[in-house]
Image (cartoon, rainbow, N blue to C red):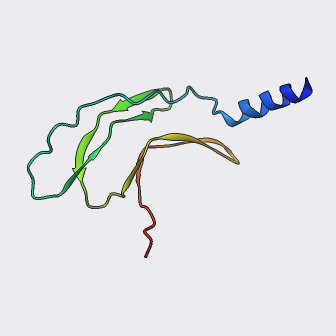
Amino acid sequence: MLLVVGLSACQQALQPPYPPVPPLRAEAMGKPPVTETLLIWQPGHWDWTGGGYEWVPGSFVPREGHGELWMPGYWEKAEDGWHWRPAHWVYSARAP
């Protein structure tokens, strides 16, 4: 019985004290605008506003300066509490 209570407490400690991030919305990408700049699709994503989540629609953005992998926003536990990590582009390490 103590083991069950202890495991339950551990599970609760790993979850942020905020509402879970809502599921992603389906959205149509459409055709990119015609520009001289190479564009990529940045998916729509949820962003934490301090009191709730706000949907940021997807859009075409300049390819330059962005990583290769899109990471949705998430909560991360640190020594000083929970921190929201906004959605962002990630650079991947390429093998030589």
**38 sits left or right of 43 in the view:** left
Where on the picture, by quarter, is residue 93? bottom left
Give the quarter of the image for residue 26: top left
In-front residue for pair 41/85: 41
State which quarter of the image contains the N terminus.
top right
Q: How many marks?
A: 0
Which residue is found at the position 24% from the left and 41% from the top? Answer: 59
Pick out the residue farthest to the right. 2
| Percent position of residue 46, x then y | 41, 33
Q: Which residue lies furthest to the bottom in this view?
A: 96
Answer above or below: position of 14 versus 71. above
What is the quadrant of the C terminus in the image?
A: bottom left
Residue ID at (32%, 40%): 43
Residue at x-position 91% and y-position 26%: 2
Locate residue 11, reporting x and y percent: 73, 32
Residue at the extreme front: 96
Going 48% across and 26% down the picture, which residue do you hit? 52
User: Which of the two residues, 79 or 30, is positioned nearer the viewer here?
Assistant: 30
Q: Quick check: 90 above or below 55?
A: below
Residue 54 in percent (x, y) is at 40, 29
**Horizontally, is 78 left or right of 56 in the view?**
right
Q: Is residue 9 left or right of residue 62?
A: right
Give the percent coordinates (x, y) of residue 41: 26, 46
